[in-house]
Image (spheres, helix red, strand yellow):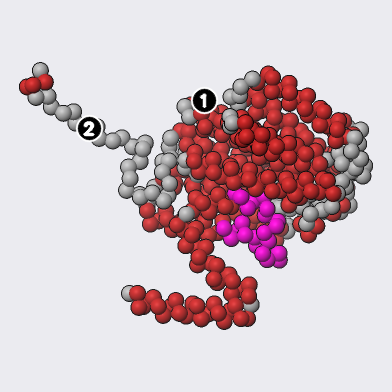
Amino acid sequence: MQRLLIIPMFLYVLLTGLAFGVNPIIGTALIVAPVLAFVVFRYPEMSLISICFFIPFDRLTIILPQAGLTITKILILFTLAAWAVRVLLHRDEYALLAFVNQPTTLFVLAYFAIIVIGVSQAKDIDMSMFFITKRLSLIIFYFLIVNLLRSMKAVNRSINAMLIASVFICLIGLYEFLTGNQFLPRTVRGSELAMTFEGSARIQACAGHSNFHSAILVLLLPFLLMRFEQVHTVGRKVILGGVVLLYVINIFGTNTRQGMLCMLTAFAGTYLLQKVRHRGRKITLGVTAGAIALAVFAMIPGKVDVSRYSGQSGLKSVEYRLAWIEMSWEMIKDRPVLGVGTGNYYSEYSRYRRFASTMATPKRVVNHNGIMQIWAENGTIGMLILLALLGSPLYVLVRTIRITDDDDCRASSTAVLISHCNYILLIGIIPMLEHEVGWIVLALSTALGNIGMGRVHRTSLLEAPSRPHPALPHKPATAPKLGPAAG
């Protein structure tokens, strides 16, 4: 058998050498692919943690810009394949239980179904297929996370991976804040948004957009604050406190109103809902420190525009959003049941612009309100399904917090609850409906619901499938018989 394997291995090495001589990229891919496949198949959970780490750097890890291929997507494909093979080999019946235990998954499937049905209403089929492919990839990613995160250890590792990655992107943001220069201009999406209307610079960082940079941070901030409250040693408190300060500087530096709003939500939610010591003292200290920081930043010219938060400036972007909502409403009135078709808000933009106020930009812009986008594209049915999809994690997390006796699970569920509330806020302000971090939070809510309810076994995929499931009843041990001497 070993001799038979030598021939295909020799041919593969020969093919790799020839490919490397013609195109180094293809040759490197042929060398890396089998090694990556072996590692991912052996350690699928570690691969998922790597994906969580690379997500904030997604625009920096682009391999083929034309195809939109990134390191993260390659890891997801390999991890998905490894998971599917292991499920089939081990006959893992709990893989399906992880999907049907929580209502969120059912609404995810209904959400995809209404998106597919929306193609029948679409005029621009190419745009519909683009959105279907994009959302399908997120749904598959959601299922992958739900199935691999079967223990609090795996959940904590994934959260920690994203927090570690966020430190690096915050350092990049700090560089931009101090120097006023973009770290990597090639990642910027919409160079005109690098400055506010009032002339203040906006941090873009790895997201390539100030709105999305602040969005990533405010979604991760509840997890960072949870970790800050969980550590007790002075050294760790100082380190995590420095990271919190780094987050605050970056959010201030983006000059985004939704960033400020969601940052306040994260702090308020954490210190009102989490189990913390000296709650009142910390809330008072936090409000005071925030006011002082805002006043200090306001005195630095061209850094933070406080007038955007007071409503004295930046009203144009608000008027744009109101105009886009008006356009969406006109589409809804024309086709209230199934909408204008999946992905066709952008295609119908010019046609419906005349119904909106004069503030709607002549240039076609994606809808910044995700709920109105789905309502316009997939009708009232699609909007109700989306609302159920966004609301079900709230129910799952609150139930998990109430029933679980694991303090770690309760704290993580509370952090996910706060982060998901921020995600709902962001969906109504910026085009965040298809953001990967938002769907990670969505998947975390389902995973924690499964862990809290004890309906999915907590053993790793790496463990032998023959081990008994902890939720299954075990045969009680037979009591020893008492001998005469015992009496």
Residue at x 51%, y 28% (from the top left corner): 407
Which sits earlier in the primary sequence, circle 2 or circle 1? 1
Residue at x 69%, y 27% (from the top left corner): 268
Task: Classify 24 as above or below 454.
Answer: below
Residue at x 70%, y 57% (from the top left corner): 60
The secondary structure type at the circle numbered 1 is helix
Quarter of the view holding residue 307: top right
Task: Classify 224 as above or below 344.
Answer: above
* Residue type (three-letter) at the residue carrying disc 2: Ala
Residue 447 at what x, y percent from top left?
A: 51, 40
Residue 199 at what x, y percent from top left?
A: 92, 44
Quarter of the view holding residue 283: top right
Q: Quadrant of the C terminus?
A: top left
Residue 5 at what x, y percent from top left?
A: 39, 75
C-alpha separation, residue under disc 2 versus residue under disc 1: 33 Å
Q: Which residues are magenta?
A: 52-75
65 vs 138, nearest the viewer: 65
The secondary structure type at the circle numbered 2 is loop
Please tell me how many numbered marks the rendered image carries.
2
Q: Quadrant of the N terminus?
A: bottom left
Can the viewer see residue 227? yes
Mark drawn on residue 402? 1
- Residue beneath disc 2: 477
Task: Specify few, some or many for label 1: CA neighbours under 10 Å numbering under 14, 14-19, or 20 or more.
Answer: few
Quarter of the view holding residue 289: top right
